[in-house]
Amino acid sequence: MIEARELVKRFGELVAVDGLSFAVAAGEIFAFLGPNGAGKTTTIQMLTTLLQPTSGSSRVDGLDPVARPYDVRARFGIVFQDPSLDIELTAYENLELHGVLYHVPRRVRVDRIEILLKLFELWERRDAPVKQFSGGMKRRLEIARGLLHTPKILFLDEPTLGLDPQSRNQLWTQVKHLNDTEGVTVFLTTHYMDEAERVADRIAIIDHGRIVAQGSPQALKQQTGADSLEHAFLALTGATIRDERTNGAADQMRQMARMWSR
């Protein structure tokens, strides 16, 4: 469903992504983990048509994001690190607008909105302005919005950042339900190792723009002799605190998120 071949992205002298190759199977939950500045967000930008690679290639549902960006966008939903909802609109209006922009037929749109708002436990608040929502409610609404046009792939870039444990648990339960019932392929990034260990079928760990290990959570623990995914992650990437190496890319991602939501 997703394939990258020797992907490279340079920003001037900075090599943010350095020859990445990996594949994600249809219906898989795939976690893309790495320290700050490792190249995770830049990789997502290339896969989702927001950046063109310096070299290498990728395929999303068999399509080239560079050659066919509009067709690729119709095949995925995305939840950015930063909020991208219109907080002056209601929950229902946010989904309605998204459905119109993606040309979802009205009858299908109405049914789909009800299904998703009920699944994410927001139906009773459908007519409330989003500015009244908690952080967890906003995140659930963003994921519901990303799934409205029935995409084959859902990209989640640190979707639970800043949420309390109960909200995190609820969100992943609902995402796994959609993965099981609709076969949605999920590509996620997170800094919560317990989340990745709980939900991911496979994990790729990226550091300094390169993949340093791939496999199931159990396989990565066995490879490093660690008793937890967190310890395996530290063994593979080191324990030194990182600064963002790609602030320019991160800023661009935030700008794209704001543009996407308009």
Image: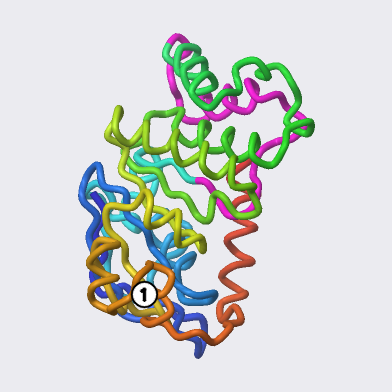
Residue 221: x %, y % from top left: 29, 70
Q: How many marks?
A: 1
Looking at the picture, does residue 158 appear above or below residue 210?
Answer: above
Residue 173: x %, y % from top left: 44, 36
Q: With 32 as the anchor, is 110 left or right in this view?
A: right
The residue that label 1 is drawn on is: 232
Is residue 194 visible in the rendered image? The answer is yes
Toward the viewer: 84 or 224? 224
Q: With 31 as the anchor, is 41 left or right in this view?
A: right
Q: Residue most toward the top?
A: 107
Looking at the picture, does residue 118 appear above or below residue 71?
Answer: above
Residue 114: x %, y % from top left: 51, 15
At x 74%, y 35%, the residue is 87
At x 27%, y 58%, the residue is 202
At x 60%, y 64%, the residue is 252
Q: Secondary structure at mark 1?
A: helix
Among the 4 quarters of the image, the one containing residue 136: top right
Q: Residue most toward the front?
A: 227
At x 45%, y 67%, the residue is 40
Colour setting: rainbow
The amino acid pointed to by label 1 is: Ala
Residue 59: x %, y % from top left: 25, 56
Q: With 78 as the anchor, is 132 left or right in this view?
A: right
Task: Give the position of the C terminus as an image quadrant.
Answer: top right
Badge 1 crowding class, 10 Å Cα cut-off, few under 14, some 14 to 19, many 20 or more, is many
- Residue 101 painted magenta: yes
Is residue 262 visible in the rendered image? The answer is no
Among the 4 quarters of the image, the one containing residue 65: bottom left
The stretch of residues the image draws in magenta is 79-107
